[in-house]
Image: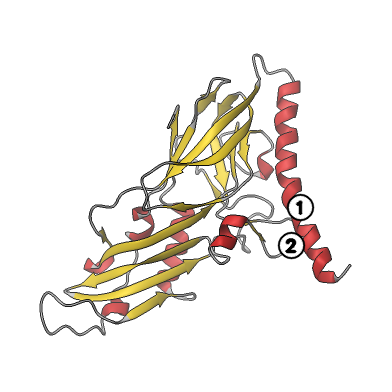
Amino acid sequence: MSQHMMKSALQRFTTLLTPLLCTLASCALLSCGEAGQSRVSVPLYASGVELSEPIEARGGVTLTLTRAELAFGALYLCAGVSAGDLCESARLEWLDSAVIDTLDPTPRTLGTLTGVSGSVRSWMYDLGLSSQLTAEEPFVLEASEELGGYSFILEGVAELDGARASFSARVKIQQSDDTELGVPVIRKSSAERFEHEVDAEESGLLLKFDPRPWLSGLDLNSYLSGVACEEVPCEPSELTFEITSPSEAHRALRIALLTRGRPTFTWGYTP
C-alpha cells in the first residue's frame, strides 16, 4: 500500500473512531443506570432565513447576498455544560454533513440524531472539515467536498455611496495551532444558554442559520474606494473583488463564523 493510501485510510479510521467513542460513551451512560433512560432517534432539520433587506456592514457598506452556503456537520449534543474532550458524555450525535443554503428559509431534512434520553446542556459541531488526532490536516467531509473543500462560500453585491461591486469569499473553518485536535472546532460558549430534556417522544430538532451576524462586522471600504460613479444611482459596476486570505476582511469573516451567528435550536419541530 502506498504512503498516500495509508494516510487516507488512517484519516478515515480516525474519523470513524471519534464518533464511535462518543457512541460508546452514550451506551455507557445507558448501562450505568440513569433512571428512565432509553435509546432515542430525533429527526434533524435545518433552514436558513429570508433576507428582505440588504445587510448593513461597517462603514456604511450594504451587502446584498446571492449565495451563502455553509458546509455543516458533524453535530454532537452533550450532557455536560461544556462541550469538548471528544464529548465523552454525548447524548445525541449526527455524524453526517450537509450543505445549508442560509438564504433559504425552507426547512430541509438532514437526517437523524441518535443517542439516549436525558438532559443536553452543550453542543459542538464542525463545518465540513473534521479535526483529526493523528493528522495535521482535517478530514474533508462530503458537504465540504461539495463546496470545493471550503466551509463557507459567499457571493453578492457590495454598495457604498452609489458605487457597486460584485464580491465573493471562500472560507475554511478547521483545526489550527490554537484549537484542540480531535474535537469539533465550534462549541457552545459558557455565556450561551442551552438546555433541553430529550425523551423518547422527541418529534424533531430544527436548526436555523442566519448569515447576518457573520457579515455585519465586515469592513469592505477599501475594496470599494476605487469604484468611480458619475451618476446617482450608479449602474452595476463591472468591478469584482474576492475576499482572500490573508486579509483583514477574510480574518474577520473567519472569526465571525467561529464565534458569532450560532444556529437557533427549536425542539419539537415537525414539518
Quadrant of the image containing the N terminus: bottom right
Q: Please, is residue 214 above or below residue 92 in the view?
A: below
Relative to 121, 229 lies left or right: left
User: Extreme right residue here?
Assistant: 1
Question: Badges 1 and 2: C-beta atoms under 8 Å apart?
Answer: yes
Residue at 65 percent of width and 19 percent of height: 37
Relative to 17, 102 lies left or right: left
Q: Which residue is mark 1?
A: 14
**Numbered tag placed on residue 141 in the rendering:** none
Q: To which quarter of the image does residue 8 belong?
A: bottom right
Callout 1 secondary element: helix
Question: How far is disc 1 from disc 2 in space, using C-alphas?
Answer: 9 Å
Relative to 64, 196 lies left or right: right
Q: Which residue is mark 2?
A: 135
- Rate crowding at label 1 as few (under 14), some (14 to 19) or many (20 or more) other CA atoms within 10 Å: many
Kindly identify the amino acid type of the residue bearing the numbered disc 2.
Ala
Q: Position of residue 131 (x, y in %)?
A: 66, 56
Q: Depth-wise, is mark 1 or mark 2 nearer the camera?
A: 1
Q: Position of residue 184 (x, y in %)?
A: 61, 50
User: Extreme left residue here?
Assistant: 232
Q: Position of residue 46 (x, y in %)?
A: 46, 43
Q: Please, is residue 236 above or below residue 115 in the view?
A: below
Residue at 10 percent of width and 77 percent of height: 232
Q: Position of residue 137 (x, y in %)?
A: 68, 65
